[in-house]
Amino acid sequence: MLPTITWDNDRVILIDQRLLPTEEIYLECLDYIQVAEAIEEMAIRGAPAIGVAAAYGVALGVNKVKESDDLEEEFERILVRLGDTRPTARNLFWALERMKQTFDNHKHLALPELKHGLIQEAIAIDKQDVETNKKIGYWGRGLIQNGQNILTHCNAGALATAGYGTALGVIRAAYEQGKKIRVFADETRPILQGARLTCWELDRDGIPVVLITDNMAGYLMKIGRIDAVIIGADRIARNGDTANKIGTYSVAVLAKEHSLPFYVAAPLNTIDFSLANGDAIPIEERNPEEVKKLAGQCITVPDIEVHNPAFDVTPAEYITAIITEKGVAKPPFTQSLASFKG
Amino acid sequence: MLPTITWDNDRVILIDQRLLPTEEIYLECLDYIQVAEAIEEMAIRGAPAIGVAAAYGVALGVNKVKESDDLEEEFERILVRLGDTRPTARNLFWALERMKQTFDNHKHLALPELKHGLIQEAIAIDKQDVETNKKIGYWGRGLIQNGQNILTHCNAGALATAGYGTALGVIRAAYEQGKKIRVFADETRPILQGARLTCWELDRDGIPVVLITDNMAGYLMKIGRIDAVIIGADRIARNGDTANKIGTYSVAVLAKEHSLPFYVAAPLNTIDFSLANGDAIPIEERNPEEVKKLAGQCITVPDIEVHNPAFDVTPAEYITAIITEKGVAKPPFTQSLASFKG
């Protein structure tokens, strides 16, 4: 399995996803600020992976605290910095909240024990994420039929998580059952997570994958080449409205137009039960240079105006089912998701 | 106005659209084979521009014929080579048919007169295309309201024609009326005609333009940022089914979902009255390297499978109106387009 991120002897090691698949280089983070920068700059991305990285970031930050430091103040600084990296992924805030709880539970102990407790908690979050993805795969694989062509957008794979993947976890589980499936991977501009990461992951595992540009999905559906869509999620409101990589909403509309099932695969910690619907999910606007440049070269008029939202929200009515580690939620999601809670 | 292509002293000069906007370099074609290669390799592209280039190619080819050559045989060779470049654009075959008619009408004359006749015919096709686009602009501008945000896909501008443009001709005409409009340009992977050509053209003319990736259009429609869609066409069946750059169909589905008008702007020589509907329009599959590489660099696993259709067909039911030089055709298009014929 791919080592997306690991705790190794007071360091956090992560594969630099900006360079894949051309270069396979590991990044070493020695403090929480380096982890925060790795999240911001998308060296690590994907909601569950961001959550795990943030947990390790907290552990790394507290691990550097000295007896003479103001512990509470330093902890607050760490939380704020890590929480300030990317606004959309629910898992980031979920992981920070869980680390805060662990901090609160352990802060009466001696500093070395607190440090140990936080490191153990981060490692537990990491390990649990892989187990969760295996469960998502187990529940989801029954939705994939032998011989199907599955469209996915962005990368909701091993690289987007601690391992195995959410959407790609379901695909892996179906493939491991012996189902003959073929994945169509949207390249996913501007960052090309589909072309760079999904193709790389699936190709390594021997799962057949065909790369297309984002604007080809509709045509392929129209000529009957796609049987189902499965994607991951960055934040899901309690009614099922789902924020995911920009372009997901377009794929959902196209799936509806062609009467194709549209599945979301995500752990329960991606669900934001505080939000009644997706309207309040913050959508990150990223640097225009991501759109204007490709492989370091400008592909347009240098000073042209650019819009670069990183995510969109797919309303629940476009979603056939949400696959979680506790089972497959069907509409109405307000009820089905609530039944999986806690 | 942009000099997309010109006849100059027994040569054809065209701006190399593969290098725009980074480099503004003109390509000199000295024989018809160079013109055919320029079309194949997309140094010149856009259905009307391909038609004009093919007409010049024929003129160039015949211009080189010697008294000792077999005129009919040589003419046939020229037509076959130029017709074999790209299968989808109707205007290519329309232009070749018109040049064949001119050839048939002039072949009884002395060779110098035949050559002169064909050159004059190609120049006439070139000039008429600009006039046609101005008329399309005149008829279409009434469909654009002051203050609107208009989405376009690919480049149906001056560069896709002999000048002024079809879809961008309508936008230019509305802008020249003093309407405050803003264009959202899909970057249009894999060749990036939107990012490279549409942004460049509109920016030169001072028309406000915002660049987005193809997968952002749905989200922008959902949040109310798009008021109408206008695109060009490569071939239109007599019922209105429209082949255009890959991704157009997806935009049409999204426009329908958001109840937005979806306009096609094209000259009547883009209409293939021999086709009852779009099912028989040939869809060109291009080199996978176009998807795998960007600015010369591989953006994915080098040996990954790729699907690279260059066009898709948008069924007539998604189209609000087809803007031609004879007026605006409304559904049912079989009737309205037929009334413009001949």
Image (cartoon, coloured by chain):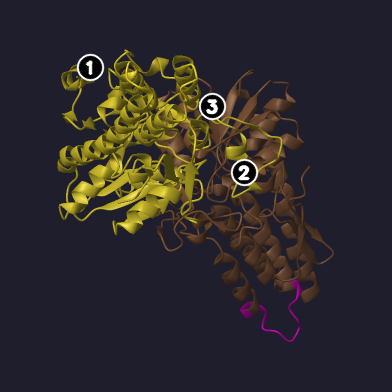
Chain colours: A yellow, B brown
Taking the image as shown, residue A50 lies to the left or right of residue A266, namely: right
Residue at which label 2 appears: A293
- What residue did someone put label 1 on? A334
- x and y, in percent, of residue B200 in the image: 70, 41
Disc 3 chain ID: A
In this rendering, the answer to whether A198 lies above or below B181 is below
Label 3: which residue? A285
Q: Nearer the viewer, residue B82 or A175?
A: A175
Residue that appears at 53% across and 50% down: B190
Q: Which residues are magenta?
A: B63-73
Image marks 3 and 2: residues in contact by CB distance under 8 Å: no
Label 2 to label 1: alpha-carbon separation = 41 Å
Of the numbered discs 1 and 3, the one sitting upstream in the chain is: 3
Task: Residue B240: tell me if it is visible.
Answer: no
Q: Amino acid at mark 1?
A: Thr
- Mark 1 vs mark 3, CA separation in Å: 28 Å
Query: Chain ID for label 1?
Result: A
